[in-house]
């Protein structure tokens, strides 16, 4: 969730750069604020703020690995590259192996991995 302060800062000092396929919007400062001349860069997430939602090329740009933002057609995806998927850990989409404590089904005839102690 984006705070009111972030939206105000973005409106006053931000210059829209682009948007990724997940709806995240990327900005940079209109004028350089540090002595090196670099302009601060930030992202306004669509939905919950989660760092793994940023695709690799946008991540490189936001961390100053790329000078130019990766706009449409800037880099073509190779046939061996998979599409970016945010990290599902901690969500209902996370992987739960059979027999885990979070409700995974036990294989036929196998006891659960945890046995309570009985005195």
Image (cartoon, rainbow, N blue to C red):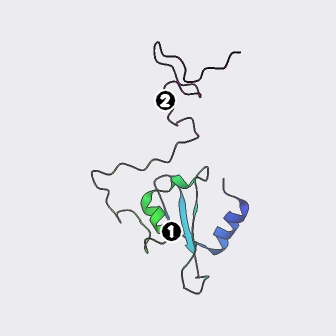
Residue under the point 56% across and 35% down = 92
Q: Which residues are magenta?
A: 90-113
Q: Which residue is mark 2?
A: 97
Residue 74 numbered tag: none
Q: Against 118, is 27 above or below?
A: below
93 inside magenta stretch: yes
Label 1: which secondary element: loop
Q: Tell me which numbered mark, 1 or 2, is placed earlier along the sequence.
A: 1
Q: Residue furthest bottom?
A: 35
Q: Position of residue 81 (x, y in %)?
A: 32, 51
Q: Against 4, is 13 above or below?
A: below
Residue under the point 48% across and 16% down = 110
Residue under the point 53% across and 64% down = 26
Question: Total marks drawn?
Answer: 2
Toward which corner of the image does residue 15 lie, by quadrant? Answer: bottom right
Q: Position of residue 73 (x, y in %)?
A: 34, 63
Q: Residue furthest front?
A: 119
Residue under the point 61% across and 53% down = 49
Q: Which residue is mark 1?
A: 63
User: Foreground residue, 50 or 113?
Assistant: 113
Q: Against 8, is 45 above or below?
A: above
Toward which corner of the image does residue 11 lie, by quadrant? Answer: bottom right
Q: Crowding near pointer 1: few (<14 within 10 Å), some, many (20+)?
A: few
Q: Crowding near pointer 2: few (<14 within 10 Å), some, many (20+)?
A: few
Question: How far apart in space, not on screen, are marks 1 and 2 (Cα)?
Answer: 35 Å
Label 2: which secondary element: loop
């Amino acid at each position: 969730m984006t705070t009111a302060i972030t939206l105000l800062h973005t409106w006053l000092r931000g210059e829209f750069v682009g948007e990724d396929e997940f709806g995240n919007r990327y900005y940079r400062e209109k004028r350089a604020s540090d002595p090196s001349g670099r302009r601060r860069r930030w992202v306004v997430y669509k939905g919950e703020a989660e760092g793994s939602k940023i695709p690799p090329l946008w991540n490189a740009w936001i961390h100053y690995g790329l000078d130019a933002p990766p706009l449409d057609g800037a880099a073509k995806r190779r046939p061996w590259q998979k599409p970016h998927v945010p990290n599902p850990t901690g969500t209902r989409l996370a992987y739960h192996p059979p027999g885990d404590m979070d409700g995974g089904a036990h294989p036929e005839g196998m006891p659960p991995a945890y046995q309570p102690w009985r005195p």
